[in-house]
Amino acid sequence: MTTVLQPERHQTPPSRHRRPAFDKKSLPARYSGQMLYFMGAALIAGAVVHYPIDPSLYTIICVVGAFVFLLGTIVNEFVLADERPALSQAVSLVAFSLLLSFGVGLVGGGIQHFEQFPERSAWMTPIGLLMSYVAFVAKDSKGRWRHLVSPFAAGVVVLSALTWLGMNALAGTISSDGHSHDHGSTTQTPAEQDQPSAEQDQTPVEQDRPAEAPAEPAEDGHTSHSH
């Protein structure tokens, strides 16, 4: 009787230090992606509205904000997504994400700093509304160009027009220089600046005169007169 020998099977023992799989749906992952979105939009909003104060500084802040928002797009749409988009779709996704970030920044910055920059905010806010909606339709996977001629799109246009009219009307009642962003300096009107000099000019001109000595009585009982 012939005995058939089976080949030995070497089983690799399981590794004790196996790294846990990355959970794309975990709360920290979703928080990181959304935080990058909102942080980038906030930086862009502040940079756009404060640009006239210091163009070089706020240009850098705007570029950093766009980079942060773009990084959030990569994390949400490529790393955390179940299916990665194709190359052409990825390019359009990145481009319209940047456009969306600037639209959100215009709306947020225009509303937040309307009192400081009323005329500038009056056109920033409605343009941001229109820009953000168009960019979101082009960016979203379920968005179609027919959504740009839908009743909801008409509502966005009407809301933007009403926002422009209302903010323009309010801007006429607010002085554009009513708020100073230089918190370390105090603003004085010309009348207040001239007040110290006027007070200096009104110093008393009277000077102390030497007291006259009393006339000594003469020997004959009459007051002496100088001849």
Image (cartoon, rainbow, N blue to C red):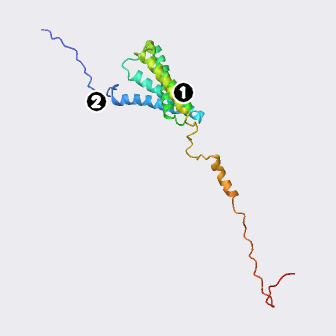
Q: CA distance from mark 1 to mark 2?
A: 61 Å
The residue identified by callout 1 is 123
Which image quadrant: the N terminus? top left
Image quarter of residue 116? top right
* The furthest residue to the top: 1
Which residue type carries mark 2? Arg
Q: Residue at x 27, y 26 (%)?
A: 14
137 horizontally vs 27: left or right: right
Q: Residue at x 38, y 21 (%)?
A: 81
The reply to whether residue 60 is in sight is no
Image coordinates of residue 66 in percent, x first then y, are: 50, 27
Residue 104 appears in the figure? yes
Furthest residue in direction right, as rendered: 227
Assign the C terminus to one quadrant of the image.
bottom right
Query: Which of 152 and 105 lies nearest the eye of the viewer?
Result: 152
The numbered dot on residue 68 is none
CB of mark 1 within 8 Å of CB of mark 2? no
Q: Position of residue 208 (x, y in %)?
A: 72, 70
Report the residue at 46% width, 26% height from top.
Answer: 71
Assign a secondary structure to mark 1: helix
Which one is nearer the viewer's eye here, 82 or 53? 53
- What type is the residue that disc 1 sits on? Trp
**Residue 112, position as x, y percentages in the image:** 49, 34
Position of residue 170 measured from the top left corner of the image (x, y, whole percent): 52, 32
Q: Is residue 7 left or right of residue 89?
A: left
In the image, residue 126 above or below residue 226: above
Q: How many marks?
A: 2
Q: Which mark is residue 16?
A: 2
Residue found at x 17% / y 11%: 4
Task: Identify the residue at the far bottom of this view.
Answer: 220
Q: Say if 213 sits above or below 29 in the image.
A: below
- Along the polypeptide, which appears first: circle 1 or circle 2? 2
